[in-house]
């Protein structure tokens, strides 16, 4: 129980030192990770069922060699691709927004440092420390969020392309 309270206290102190922008970054990263996890769950559990239904629908067609059948096959693959790529553009946007929010934290923190410098001069490092931490902590948080997002969006892109290609190959023209 004490470890949980210590962890809560540490997070609270980090949020206090990082300023209000850190809350925005935290929200962006939370939404990004929620969408990333949803995509991985879909790839693991939802897509195999969808692929089976698409293959069964294709195999159930009496005719699979005509131009019309080829177009229907292309439509089935495109529909599956749309379901696979759902939310990927939003995740990419959140990955791009994350360091920009960190930059916003840098600017607001440096403005606080300049305000302190204009009031008390450069001799009081203790007074400037709050602004410096409000400048560096959001920058770090935004970059960490963006880096993890880039890593996992790359994995998701590769998985999406591989699964689409595998589904396309499984829809044969023989009959």
Image: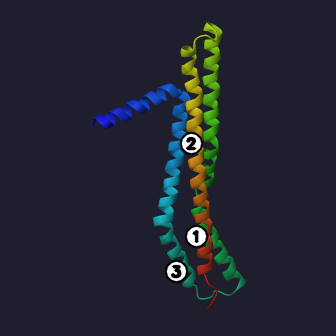
Q: Residue at x 50, y 76 (%)?
A: 52
Answer with mark 2 or mark 1, whichever residue precedes in sequence: 2
Residue 144 numbered tag: 2
Q: CA distance from mark 2 to mark 1?
A: 29 Å
| Farthest-out residue, bottom | 175
In this picture, is 3 found above or below 173? Answer: above
Where does residue 42 sit, x and y in percent of width and height? 49, 62
Q: Residue at x 57, y 36 (%)?
A: 140
Q: CA distance from mark 3 to mark 1?
A: 17 Å
Residue 158 seen from this side: yes
Q: Nearer the viewer, residue 23 or 73?
A: 23
Quarter the N terminus occupies:
top left
In this picture, is 70 found above or below 122? Answer: below
Q: Nearer the viewer, residue 90 or 60?
A: 90
Q: Nearer the viewer, mark 3 or mark 1?
A: 1
Quadrant of the rendered image containing residue 78: bottom right
Q: Nearer the viewer, residue 85 or 66?
A: 85
Where does residue 85 sit, x and y in percent of width and height? 60, 60
Residue 56 numbered tag: 3
Secondary structure beneath disc 3?
Answer: helix
Q: Residues within 10 Å of mark 2 (few under 14, many from 20)?
A: some
Q: CA distance from mark 2 to mark 3?
A: 43 Å
Q: Residue at x 54, y 15 (%)?
A: 126
- Residue under label 1: 163
Give the left or right position of residue 103, taking residue 56 as reference: right
| Farthest-out residue, right | 67
Secondary structure beneath disc 2?
Answer: helix
Answer with mark 3 or mark 1, whichever residue precedes in sequence: 3
């Amino acid at each position: 129980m004490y470890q949980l309270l210590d962890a809560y206290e540490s997070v609270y102190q980090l949020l206090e030192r990082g300023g209000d922008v850190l809350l925005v970054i935290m929200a962006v990263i939370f939404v990004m990770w929620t969408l990333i996890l949803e995509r991985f769950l879909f790839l693991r559990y939802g897509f195999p069922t969808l692929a089976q239904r698409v293959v069964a629908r294709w195999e159930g067609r009496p005719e699979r060699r005509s131009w019309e059948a080829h177009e229907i096959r292309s439509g089935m693959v495109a529909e599956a691709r749309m379901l696979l790529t759902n939310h990927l553009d939003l995740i990419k946007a959140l990955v791009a927004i994350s360091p920009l929010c960190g930059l916003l934290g840098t600017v607001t923190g440096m403005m606080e440092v300049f305000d302190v410098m204009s009031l008390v001069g450069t001799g009081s490092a203790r007074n400037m420390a709050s602004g410096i931490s409000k400048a560096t902590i959001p920058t770090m948080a935004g970059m960490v969020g963006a880096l993890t997002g880039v890593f996992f969006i790359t994995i998701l892109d590769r998985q999406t392309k591989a699964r689409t290609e595998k589904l396309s190959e499984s829809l044969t023209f023989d009959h």
